[in-house]
Image (cartoon, rainbow, N blue to C red):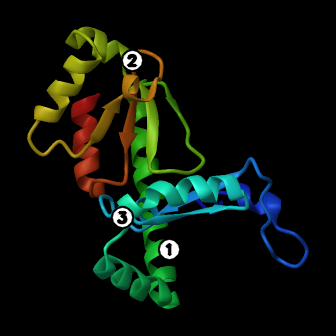
Amino acid sequence: HAGRFPSVLNMYHNDSGDCRLPQHVHFVWGLSKDFAANGLRCGCIYTDSEEVIHAASKFLYFFQVGGTIQEQMATCLEDDTWVDTFLSQSRKQIWNALGITQDRLHQAGVPFHRPEGGLFVWADLGKWAHAAGGELELFRHLTTLPQGGVLLCPGASFRAHEGWFRICVSSAQASHLEVGLQRLT
């Protein structure tokens, strides 16, 4: 996919390149998605709101990232060549996995939303959930399959409509994803 996911922050850049956010807009970014660093809980908040900064400063003391992790992340992020290479390869792998997932869902007649960015696809597995005895039963069944290759969550976890599941496409190799999707549908 040649397109790029547009950031909402692009709306707030002025002619000099500065990003000034309105008081009601706050940007939270973490390393977990872009850098496959799930679990590190390392990120930042960008805001021009003194109220948000004041509130965040009251509780952030309890959620500080350890010095070793800060040092390792700084070393990685300061290496522009490494960052550009990693993000480029990651994007290609994710778009490939999105394509495989969408093709497989389409072939199986599963309704789904085509994402414009992100790491997952929303799919309506209501027919399969009903046959399995409900969303949680389908989820339990799929998570007990050996080497399933598909990480999915029932939509109820995200307040989605009954029968919709979030399929994460970035958590498996393409070959494992294909096998998992075949088992799913």
Residue at 88%, 79% in the rendered image: 16
Instruction: Judge the density around disc 2: few (<14), some (14-19), many (≥20) Cα neighbours within 10 Å.
Output: many
Q: Earlier in the sequence, mark 2 or mark 3?
A: 3
Q: Which mark is residue 88?
A: 1
Vertical placement of residue 3 versus 101, above or below: below
Q: Type of residue at label 3?
A: Ala
Residue at 44%, 44% in the rendered image: 120
Q: Earlier in the sequence, mark 3 or mark 1?
A: 3
Residue 106 in view: no
Out of 1 and 88, give the one closest to the viewer: 88
Q: Type of residue at label 2?
A: Gly
Which residue is under mark 2? 163
Distance between the Cα atoms at labels 1 and 2?
34 Å
Quadrant of the snapshot with the C terminus: top left
Q: How many marks?
A: 3
* The quarter of the displayed image where residue 4 is located: bottom right
Which residue is under mark 3? 36
162 lies left or right of 8:
left
Q: Are marks 2 and 3 in contact (CB under 8 Å)?
A: no
In what element is the residue under mark 2? loop
Residue at 50%, 56% in the rendered image: 58
Q: Type of residue at label 1?
A: Ser
In what element is the residue under mark 1? helix
Quadrant of the snapshot with the N terminus: bottom right
